[in-house]
Image (tube, rainbow, N blue to C red):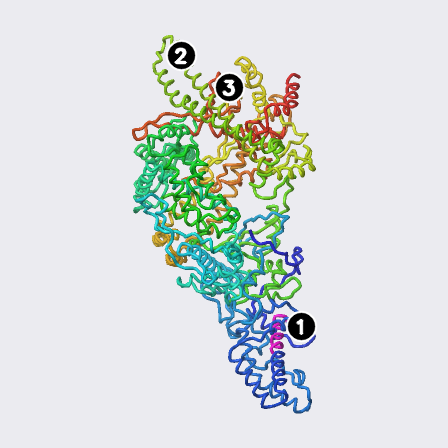
Amino acid sequence: MSRRSKPVQQQTTFTGVNNELPQLRSRESLKRQISDVPEGPSSKRTRVHSLRDYFNQSMVNHLNSMVQNAWKKSKGDKAKFTKEVNLLKAKSETPRLPSGTLKDAANLAHCEHHEMITYMNNNGEKLNKFLWKDFFDANVDNVAQRFQAGHAATSSSTPAGPSAAPLQPMAAGPSSAPFQPMAAGPSTPSMPFTSPFQSTAAGPSTATASSDDDDTSSETTISEIGSVFDEDPTKDYRTCSVTMNKILRADLPEAIKNIIFGKLNDATHRSTDYALNYYLVLHLLLLKFRDGTFALENQTPVFRDAPGFAIARLLPAGYVKSEHCNVTHSALPIPTAFFASTNLAQDFDLLFQKSHLALMQSYFFGVRGALESSLTAHPVQKALFQSLIPCNVTPQKYSAHGLSSAECQNVANKIQTNIGNMWKGNKIFKHLLNKLLHALLSIHLAPDREAQRQEAMTKRDKGKSKDKGKGKERATPLPPSAGGPSTTQSASIKPFTRNAFRNIRRGETKKINSYQAKKEQDPSNPKWDSKIQHCQSRIDRCYHLYKNSPRSIETPSAVDDDDEKVVSVEDQEEEEENEEAQAQSNLSRRRLRVLTAVCRDLLLDDGIAACTEDHIKKLLEDPQQPEVDCCLNLVTRLKPYIPRKDAQNSLARVLPFCLLANDTLGFTGYNKFQRKLLPDPQFTHQYPLSLSAQTIYYALDRGPDRLIMYSYDGSVLISATKANQNKDACYNSIFDLNAVQQVCKSYGLTFAQHMILMPGLKTVRILGCRPKKATYNEDTKGDKQQRWTKEVLQNEIVVREAQKDDDAINADINEAEERVKVLKEELKSALKEFDYASFGQKIKDKKKTWIPGVTNNALYGEIQQLKIDRNEAFMKTQHIRQEMRSVRQSLFYMRTAKKNKSKIRELNAAKSTATTTAEDIPALRRGGHGVHIGPRRLAQDIDIDNDVVFSGTDNGFVTMTETVAFDAKRFAFHLDMFCHQGLDKEEQAALVAKHDPAFLSLPPSYKIKADDVDFRCGYRKARLKLERRKRENPHIRQLEQASRESSLKGADTAQSYLSRFSVQQSNSGALQAFYDSPARRAENRHLELHNKTQRNKICASERQFVAQHKKEESSGPAGEGSSRRKPKPKPIMMIGDSGLGVGSTIKGYRRYGGTWKQNLQGGNTHVCCTSEYMTSQTCMYCFSKLTHPTSKQVVKGKVVTKKVPGAFVCLNPDCVLQQFGRNVFARDKLSALAIGLSGVNQLLFQATFPQLSRKFSDTSTDFINKTASFRSGREARASV
């Protein structure tokens, strides 16, 4: 996040159309204007002119003061005075601006110190020290003579001061002109347009220091700039996109427009180069940890090159590394003695933090470099910086960027924000720790399964290498086009599927019907016959490809649900592995998970300095010696890398381990588990330009054809500080603020005085703000884990257990642990009895012996008995699992209560003082809209039977969302089914007859798939266009191939990274010209607009599907002839809170997930984010657990058990669906219905079904009591 700073007080603001702002003009025109104005008190000189005069006057005062001091030292002796003057001349041979010159000039001009510094840095002809040297050499003799003559004339015993022989500003020299802003002097011609690809820096005045003695260093200047914009914590910030031409001022002359676009384009190129170099230094510093480590020499930290940790030491002997990995050694652990000094430990913890990055920015990118005092105060950082000198990355290596400190800080802020977001918490460390232990344990203790994985990876890589030949640039097949030959599409990785052929045939048939209708209207035109023939030939060609393409064997599914084509291993397969583990060399996956947890606990335990076998055997149940030896080896080698718990949130402390984990995962082929440690640079696109007021000022004031901006009071914006104090005037110099405010208003935003200019200068993202919405009065402090912990400590069971003494709690814990062990054994025996696939195969075999036309009562009885045995075995396992879940949850509550007694007392004492009633919960009003997170209730004036219709939405990856709609009648049906559990078959049939029998089937659903979003929003078309252009441009393909071969991920050392980076950077110019070409920019802008429209249409179609659920009822009975219809019911949508597809690592799927759909829906109706806990595992008719159907399949000559992941089956013999034969459900459709029902319960009763509640204290009796009034009211209305 950007750093929050104090808002800058604005001197002038934009109030509307009455603001008159002078147009931009070049400094040359301003110079001519000033020179034509006569001097005198009646005409005020522009302040741009006067600042230079004040600087000249300050130099005069300082020279007079120096001569006066020399006269005092000589005590009136002319010979000594001459000697002192000569000594001053000798010192002036080394140019150095006297201390305080700029400060005195600022005092004379009544401006701020940094304002004078900024003006002189950017508007002087030479460096300030050279201006002083020229002035000193030209005037020191005259001043000395005047001083000496004035003393002789007055014969005063007191040395004459500056007033005795005053010196006027220089009459000759480069500063004699009233205004000379250009670095090249007044003779520089005025150019209407400057190419951004040409260097515009003239002389050393671009981003130079004022003097060596100036007390404002580059790093302090950067740190004082603050955030990019003044952030208000009471507001939400959003961006909205608009084309540049729409908000550009229409009254700007064409020449000025060309200058503006040229300068902004130049600023974009400079910022991109600066960002790439910034990323380069960051990654080099990171990779130095792999090349060496820190050490102490005379209590001074140094960085020594040393051979890294050999990854093979963590692996079995003879293990062959992955052929795609170049890294064999990784980072060494930081010696513990290094952290003995508190100062060194604190300085080490600052690595890659904001202060370290600011010092790095000054050291490598600052014009004057970092101050020696700053480097001395941070010896660890200094040692790390100096370690890059062998790589030819020296101090001030990248200082010739030509950007101001504000522009540099804008780029740095973005990178620092990305790093902060990546390392928020210690998620990267925990992820890599778990995955590394899992991979190493699998390699050591499951070698056969690891060999199969390696073999599969080798075959996959060979298949990929075959597809990289000529004519096979595409990774996914294209449907045959009308004009292209069929041979170009036949060589594809994926087969031409039946659905693809049907889609093409459907589209071509539709075209044929359209052409035939047009042919009947215009029979004389022969083109219709050719078009019809063309469509028919494409159908025939696609049919031929479909018939000749290889088929993939699909797993039979129990329902018509094609969401998941990937089959996964059943839990039952793991149980079979448990039984066969003794006879095989592979440990089961479940046992590997247990070992992973044991190793993780030992590594994270600060109380264990050296792990022994006793520690492992104490945590591991039924330990085997190979398991103990493997765990001991891994824990011993990894323990030095693990920091203490209080230091695990420090990026620098966990960095060596994260490097080791990434390198080891790559070494073993587990690349999918690797994590980025720093953001990667991009070479194919330019980086967006952050348009703050200071950025605009520096961009327009740089190079030839500098432009002058004015404030609303007519004064010139002479510095970046003034521009920052007049932000509206600065933006209004280029943009039409009326148009900007109109665009923000259309999004419900207010202009927040910040913009982002996209590459190509076609699109601008405007930053807007809006007041934060009022939220439900609940504690939102801390992260999600902290809030969850606080909620657990306030649980009723935890509070009740905390009131017991420790002896009683320990006795209960021991009893519960013993019960868990007994239940584990019972579950093992129950799982052996229940084998769904075996029961299914037996039932199929019995059915095959069925003789048609003959009485098969005995066979029928056998089949029914098999089904009863199957269902009873399943229910037995479910009862054991439910009891085990209850006992384990009780164990968790008891242990939590024992550990946090004092915290529980404090929290509950504070909780007792605050009471919350139902009226405090926000209500959903009629006609309202919004996305609601947290408790909500329905307003009392809403009739749920007529005013609203409900829906539930389940999120996924392939099928992004599946939505079902239902009304209050279906909700009442499921509520009655819950409240009347345990009925016999006759009573169940009577209860179903009381409601609608159609409720026994799941309602129809509306699916939105990733392919739909990809096609309708134009992403697929854009990809095809890009691929076609690449095929037409072989040079770009060659550059991309060279970039892939020099990928930065393959760098094993800092020197290797530097060489690969140079290759990437040399190719970036041509790639950026290709990807950021005018045609591509126009297509991206069109895609952005089209995407917004189509996503709104997708959401509108989903709302229409939900609203049509009660369309017939809302329109009234037919034949009434009433002109007044009932209002349409308003949808209230319950959307699941998980499975949004953000950051998904599933390969091969287009990922368009996120919260965009629920946000768009929330702009039109009420959307409630609902918990998905157990919604996909619970039957909504009997509220028991579900299971996946399974089948026996032969894979590689071995019979394995596979499950059908797209379906669920209810095996509860007491379920009402058993007698109607409807106990198989589509997975996502059932989950969507459960989410909707759970959300409606929360709205009506502020509780949900206990089976769907995370709170262990919720019981069925409490929920039935809460719903009693609702059910009795509906029964009363039904009887009337």
Does 982 appear above or below 240? above
Q: Nearer the viewer, residue 86 or 1009?
A: 86
Which residue carries the number 2 mark?
860
Name the residue rendered at 40%, 12% in the picture: 860
Label 2 sits on a secondary structure element that is helix
- The residue carrying pointer 3 sits among few (fewer than 14), some (14 to 19) or many (20 or more) residues within 10 Å by Cα, namely many
Q: CA distance from mark 3 to mark 2?
A: 21 Å
> Is 47 within the magenta?
yes
Residue 1251 in percent (x, y) is at 55, 27
Q: Which residue is mark 1?
A: 44
Residue type at the position of mark 2: Tyr
Marking on residue 34? none
Q: Is residue 1131 left or right of residue 154?
A: left
Q: Which residues are magenta?
A: 46-59
1086, 313: nearer the viewer = 313
Q: Residues within 10 Å of mark 2 (few under 14, many from 20)?
A: some
Image: 500 above or below 57 = above
Sequence-earlier tag: 3 or 2: 2
